[in-house]
């Protein structure tokens, strides 16, 4: 048994050694395949030989218990998957195929097939990657272009509320000013602290324009100021304003100041329609930029999109209006001019039976609603009032407008083919759309007797008008929808704007002229208190208790106007409601003029009417006393209208004062309603401008009132009687005593003869 065991062991050792030697010789002793086989032979020698020997010994000693006999010819080699992968390499396989057992060949070929498939997949992925970049591999590059150093004179200029045109921020212009400041027009101005600083004289620089052909300064509205220049200059404005940002100067972090400017120029530079609508929005952008600089107002995203939408509407309207409805090149049916279709006259649409007798009014401009000129020849800078809905030009109340008639007028070559029910001709100015801002009111806390005093002062409404009479007459003449908020405002006060919360009391010092004329100021305040339009004087704490919180006091100014020789100077006490500072914006900065529409009859309109007046026409004038002071203010907005007389003496105003940006609209709402009611009562024509009213008297065939050989329907007394229930405070001294043919109106003399 011992000899047999030795023989088996020797055979095993001989087989392993011989195989190893054969493979080493086949590859020169250095190939990967040889090393692979040798590695496994060594492993077999260490692990498998002893196990097989033990198995054979057990079988020989007890065949019943150990029936498995290990054959001497069983392969001692055991290959793992990675070994098969290496042997599947064509070069290695060809070198050692003679010594590789046959049973291994199919498995090696399977690995070769799998290897080729994986290689093809890798090549496809590599090819696709060649067409794209891994974003993680991008190397950031710091852009140093167009970064300029702004000279100090830029900051001094802007700090003095000067709005620098964008061309001043073009890199070459900034560089030129920095290096050739002695050649640039400048001026000395007073600044805070009674010191003088040198700033850029923008007016003279723009007038000069070119400097040695190295710098070119132009206004923002210049025709040759391109959109590309706007984008370049806008980026520099952001960089400049960043240097003025308190947070950046302190912590090297962008604050809300920088963010506001970045948002502003990012919108106008990157909007999808910015380039196409550039000439239509640039004026609005300039106005918004001026407001940001002068009043520290930050616009919201809604403001910007509304501005862009307004530009788009203007562009669409003007483009449509400039089209030629009677074009000689083609007609809507696609036929060339001169081609004639049988039955054209029978098939034309909109043939109203009364079209031949239609009376056409004078031509009206679609753009500005002005008369006697076409849209093409319009030079008016007013915004458009019509709207485009589904490519149809409409009035604000939704009526389609006949573009052909407004462009051509009563042109028989291009007659209109529609009825008056289908489209309107005359583009009358739209009725004023008075907005309700009640949802914006920041209400003061309710009255608390433990903290607040004088509840009657907070709720006090002062107005001479009879609100119930307005309600009755508006309803009588079907005018309620034209003035939906008037009666409510007369009962509860007018809003002055979309005012924010007032967190702390803000007191601006009065103008130095007040100290020089304190007796005049005292008399003015006393008169207002006696009339009930103001209450005071109070201390700061008393005003805060009466108005249930903080307030803002704007400065008073005494303005003296020199009159004609022999006449005393005219003294006016003005409220400077546009006074503000960086931390505390002015009252007017929160008021959007577009929220408060109004209209007046200008001297030009009056002159046009006079030139076309019939023989025998006469006129009279009448003024409303204390026009703006007749308009009560909403109690929650009284906190913005406090004034200071002598130091520490404050007065609460119960009326909307002249100087508030919304004053003319609020008082104008009342005046416009008066005029409409008056006309509905039969007094017409009437012209109005603020508190001045001019009433005309036209000749009629027969009437009790006669003058100069003509009959008239009313005189001044009976005309005023028709609206006496409104309780209008007419000035007792201003205006003419009755109708005449020679009047003074708007500071001009009018001869009606």
Image: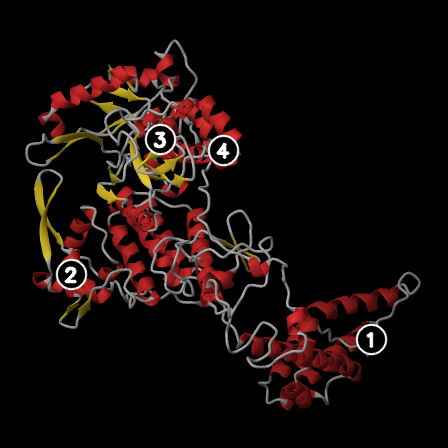
The Cα atoms of the two marked residues, 4 and 1, are separated by: 123 Å
Judge the density around disc 2: few (<14), some (14-19), many (≥20) Cα neighbours within 10 Å.
some
- The total of numbered circles placed on residues is 4
The numbered dot on residue 4 is 1
Secondary-structure class at tag 3: loop
N-terminal-most mark, 1 or 3: 1
The mark closer to the camera, 4 or 2, is 4
Secondary-structure class at tag 2: helix
Secondary-structure class at tag 4: loop
The mark closer to the camera, 3 or 2, is 3
Judge the density around disc 1: few (<14), some (14-19), many (≥20) Cα neighbours within 10 Å.
few
Q: Where is residue 176 in the image (x, y as percent from the top left)?
A: 16, 65
- Tag 4 residue: 484
Which residue: 69% across, 79% down? 117
- Tag 2 residue: 205
The Cα atoms of the two marked residues, 3 and 2, are separated by: 59 Å
N-terminal-most mark, 4 or 2: 2
From this viewpoint, which residue is outermost toward the right? 64
- Tag 3 residue: 715
Which residue: 25% across, 54% down? 240
Residue 667 visible to an observer of this rendering: no
Nearer-the-camera pick, 72 or 334: 334
The N terminus - image quarter: bottom right
The Cα atoms of the two marked residues, 3 and 4, are separated by: 32 Å
N-terminal-most mark, 3 or 2: 2
Secondary-structure class at tag 1: helix
In the rendered view, does 107 fall on the left or right side of 263? right
């Amino acid at each position: 048994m011992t000899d047999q065991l030795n023989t088996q062991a020797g055979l095993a050792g001989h087989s392993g050694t011989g195989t190893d030697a054969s493979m080493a010789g086949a590859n020169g002793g250095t190939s990967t395949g040889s090393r692979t086989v040798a590695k496994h032979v060594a492993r077999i020698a260490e692990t498998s030989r002893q196990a097989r020997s033990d198995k054979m010994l057990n079988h020989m000693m007890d065949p019943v218990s150990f029936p498995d006999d290990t054959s001497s010819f069983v392969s001692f080699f055991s290959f793992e998957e990675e070994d098969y992968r290496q042997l599947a390499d064509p070069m290695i396989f060809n070198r050692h195929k003679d010594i590789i057992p046959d049973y291994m060949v199919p498995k090696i070929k399977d690995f070769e097939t799998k290897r080729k498939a994986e290689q093809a997949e890798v090549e496809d992925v590599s090819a696709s990657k060649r067409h794209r970049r891994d974003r993680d591999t991008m190397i950031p590059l710091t852009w140093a272009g167009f970064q300029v150093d702004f000279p100090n004179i830029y900051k001094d200029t802007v700090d003095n509320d000067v709005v620098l045109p964008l061309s001043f921020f073009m890199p070459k212009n900034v560089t030129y000013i920095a290096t050739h400041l002695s050649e640039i027009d400048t001026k000395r101005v007073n600044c805070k602290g009674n010191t003088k600083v040198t700033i850029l004289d923008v007016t003279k620089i723009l007038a000069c324009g070119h400097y040695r052909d190295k710098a070119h300064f132009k206004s923002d509205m210049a025709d040759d100021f391109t959109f590309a220049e706007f984008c370049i200059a806008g980026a520099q404005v952001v960089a400049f304003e960043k240097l003025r940002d308190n947070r950046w100067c302190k912590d090297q972090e962008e604050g809300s100041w920088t963010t506001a400017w970045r948002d502003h120029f990012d919108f106008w530079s990157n909007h999808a329609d910015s380039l196409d609508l550039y000439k239509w929005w640039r004026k609005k952008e300039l106005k918004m930029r001026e407001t940001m600089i002068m009043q520290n107002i930050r616009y919201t995203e809604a403001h910007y999109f509304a501005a862009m939408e307004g530009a788009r509407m203007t562009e669409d309207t003007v483009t449509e209006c400039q089209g030629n409805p009677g074009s000689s090149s083609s007609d809507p049916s696609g036929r060339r001019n001169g081609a004639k279709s049988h039955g054209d006259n029978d098939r034309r649409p909109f043939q109203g039976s009364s079209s031949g007798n239609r009376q056409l009014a004078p031509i009206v401009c679609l753009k500005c609603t002005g008369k006697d000129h076409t849209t093409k020849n319009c030079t008016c800078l007013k915004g458009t009032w019509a709207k485009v809905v589904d490519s149809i030009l409409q009035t604000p109340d939704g009526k389609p407008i006949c573009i052909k008639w407004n462009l051509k007028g009563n042109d028989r070559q291009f007659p209109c083919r529609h009825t008056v029910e289908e489209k309107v001709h005359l583009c009358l100015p739209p009725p004023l759309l008075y907005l309700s801002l009640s949802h914006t009111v920041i209400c003061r806390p309710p009255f608390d007797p433990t903290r607040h005093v004088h509840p009657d002062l907070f709720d006090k409404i002062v107005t001479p008008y009879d609100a119930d009479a307005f309600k009755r007459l508006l309803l009588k003449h079907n005018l309620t929808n034209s003035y939906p908020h008037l009666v409510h405002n007369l009962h509860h006060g007018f809003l002055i704007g979309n005012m924010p919360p007032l967190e702390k009391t803000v007191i601006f010092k009065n103008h130095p002229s007040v100290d020089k004329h304190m007796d005049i100021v005292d008399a003015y305040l006393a008169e207002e208190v006696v009339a009930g339009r103001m209450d005071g004087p109070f201390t700061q704490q008393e005003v805060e208790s009466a108005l249930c919180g903080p307030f803002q006091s704007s400065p008073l100014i005494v303005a003296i106007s020199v009159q004609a020789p022999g006449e005393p100077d005219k003294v006016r006490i003005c409220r400077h409601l546009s006074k503000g500072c960086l931390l505390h914006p002015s009252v007017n900065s929160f008021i959007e003029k577009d929220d408060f529409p109004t209209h007046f009859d200008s001297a030009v309109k009056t002159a046009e009417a006079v030139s076309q007046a019939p023989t025998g026409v006469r006129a009279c004038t009448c003024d409303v006393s204390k026009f703006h002071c007749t308009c009560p203010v909403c109690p929650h907005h009284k906190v913005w209208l406090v004034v200071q007389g002598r130091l520490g003496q404050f007065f609460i105003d119960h009326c909307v004062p002249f100087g508030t940006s919304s004053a003319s609209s609020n008082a104008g709402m009342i005046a416009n309603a008066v005029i409409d009611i008056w006309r509905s009562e039969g007094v017409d024509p009437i012209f109005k401008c603020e508190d001045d009213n001019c009433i005309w008297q036209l000749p009629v065939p027969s009437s009790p009132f006669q003058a100069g050989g003509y009959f008239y329907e009313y005189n001044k007394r009976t005309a005023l009687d028709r609206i006496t229930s409104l309780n209008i405070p007419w000035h007792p001294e201003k205006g003419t005593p009755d109708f005449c043919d020679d009047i003074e109106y708007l500071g001009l003399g009018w001869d009606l003869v």
